Amino acid sequence: MNDADLDKFRLLLIQQRDELKSSLQMAQQSTETVELDQASVGRVSRGDAMQAQSMAVETSRLKQQQLRKISMALSLIESGDYGYCSICDQDIDQRRLEVDPAATMCVPCASKQE
Ligand SMILES: [Zn+2]
């Protein structure tokens, strides 16, 4: 992969990382707001509140997972190992990286994992 491509993916990754970070922050704030509303109004049933809570937890868990993948991809760019499959060491198709710049497996390996 040439430097221009690496720069492109680095920018994409940084952009995605910043978006994830701010949406995690917003999710945290809205969870706090929900708790306040419940305390003052008390109309939300305990079951609904717990369901909403566990969905929020799951969503932020996935986002944190993605954040880790992105930081890993960024460190791979720094070390010059970006764009190679972590399983078979072959080049990862750039079209795949354009869809998910944090991908660490090539298409054949990723489909074997699923
Ligand atoms: Zn592979």
Image: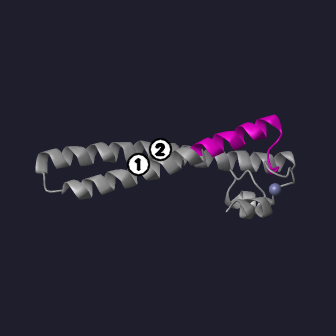
The correct choice, above or below, for 33 with respect to 97 in the image is: above
| Residue 22 disc label | 2
Left/right placement of residue 52 relative to residue 5 reads left
Residue at position x 87%, y 48% in the image: 2
Q: Find residue 55 and report its horizontal and vertical position in percent.
A: 38, 55
Q: Amino acid at mark 1?
A: Val
Q: In this picture, which residue range is highlighted in magenta?
A: 67-85
Left or right, 34 with respect to 23, comes to: left
| Disc 1 crowd, CA 10 A, few/some/many (<14, 14-19, 20+) | some
- If you read the primary sequence from the N terminus, does the residue marked by circle 1 or circle 2 appear first? 2
Secondary structure of the magenta portion, mostly?
A: helix
Which is nearer the eye, 61 or 79? 61
Horizontal arrangement in the rendering, residue 52 relative to residue 98 (left or right): left
Question: How is the protein colored in the picture?
Answer: one colour
User: Residue at coordinates 73% horizontally, 57% vertically from top-left?
Assistant: 97
Q: x%, y% of residue 102?
A: 68, 50
Residue labelled 1 has its Cβ within 8 Å of some atom of ligand 1: no
Marks 1 and 2, how far apart at CA: 16 Å
Is the Cβ of the residue at disc 1 closer than 8 Å to that at disc 2?
A: no
Whole-percent x and y of residue 62?
Answer: 52, 50
Q: Which disc, if any, is residue 36?
A: none
In this image, 14 relative to 44: left or right? right
Please, what secondary structure does the residue beneath circle 2 have? helix
Q: Could you tell me which residue is drawn at 25 percent across and 58 percent down? A: 48
Q: In the image, which disc is placed on residue 57?
A: 1
Residue 103 magenta-highlighted = no
Give the amino acid at mark 2.
Ser
Quadrant into which the C terminus falls: bottom right
**Is 51 placed above or below 80 here?**
below
Task: Name the quarter showing ligand 1.
Answer: bottom right
Rendered residue at 79%/63% (across/down): 108
